[in-house]
Image (cartoon, rainbow, N blue to C red):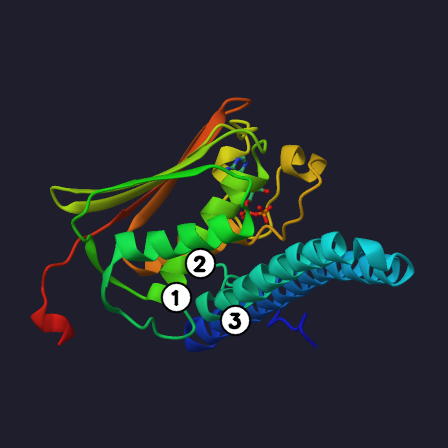
Amino acid sequence: DLSARANGTFCGEVGDLARAFNDMALRIEQLICAEKELLANVSHELRTPLARIRVVLETAQEAPARAQELLHEIGRDLAELEELVENVMASARMDVASTEMSSARLPLRLERRDLCAIAHESARRFRRMHPHRQLELESSREPAWVRADATLMRRVFDNILENACKYSDVGSPILMRLHTDAGAVRAEVMDSGIGIDAEDLPLVFNAFFRSDRSRNRETGGAGLGLCLAKRIVDAHGGSIGIDSVPGRGTTVRILLKPTDDVSAFA
Ligand code: ADP
């Protein structure tokens, strides 16, 4: 029985034990609730592209002449599914269902990495997936060395770029900028999209949060992307922030500590 509680007034050691037991019971309840919410959000987001793929396949069978165009649509839905699966797997690693911030269930695989190279990989994926979107990349030629888990940092950039794309119009450009200055490696992603209302800004890093503005758009989303990005950046000892003007656009900023300690990674 998960609602079990040590009731009554206890003093001394028994009292301490009773309180510890009650805290633990509450925490388990919270975790189960969060896991259920994760499952509900993810199943919903899985169903939408799967249902579309089924319809498109049926159409292709009836109209083989349109096969090329329909295959392209299936490719887009598969990419959406892949993103979701990647985010769910990373969420399990980063314990997004937990209420304690920046906890990771599994240790990070930290290596000396060039953040510019990771950002470029993410940009290449983005351009492949969204050939009609304009993504400008601004970075110095110098590598930006950080201690990072490259797979997880890729997730951060992929999620932020996907958001910039989902929440802005096809014609508007997206800018990704990287630079290193005294003591910090900075990465910024800017869009000129729908923006975020001031009252929603403090909530965007919460798991499963989606604003009404974004729900009204036809794009999917499980509300995991930014929560995951924050968990990952925090676990790297960095920080992530977001500025937005409704109707004008959004900027996401990431700050990481540079490293030039080559020996530590030998
Ligand atoms: P998802 O995009 O799956 O809904 P995220 O966790 O990535 O989830 O983002 C949470 C919410 O923050 C989004 O639903 C949206 O309301 C808002 N948001 C995030 N990035 C942007 C952006 N670039 N422009 C406008 N709104 C954004």
Q: Quadrant of the C terminus?
A: bottom left
**Residue 254 drawn above or below residue 235:** above
Q: Is residue 152 left or right of residue 167?
A: left
Q: Are marks 2 and 1 in contact (CB under 8 Å)?
A: yes
Camera-side residue: 147 or 32? 147
**Residue 118 drawn above or below residue 16:** above
At 55% across and 22% down in the image, what residue appears?
247
Quadrant of res 40 = bottom right
Q: Amino acid at mark 1?
A: Thr
Answer with the quadrant where ligand 1 appears in the image: top right
Q: Amino acid at mark 3?
A: Met
Camera-side residue: 12 or 79? 79
Pick whichever of labels 3 and 2 is earlier in the sequence: 3
The residue carrying mark 3 is 24
Pick whichever of labels 1 and 3 is earlier in the sequence: 3
State the mark number for residue 151: 1
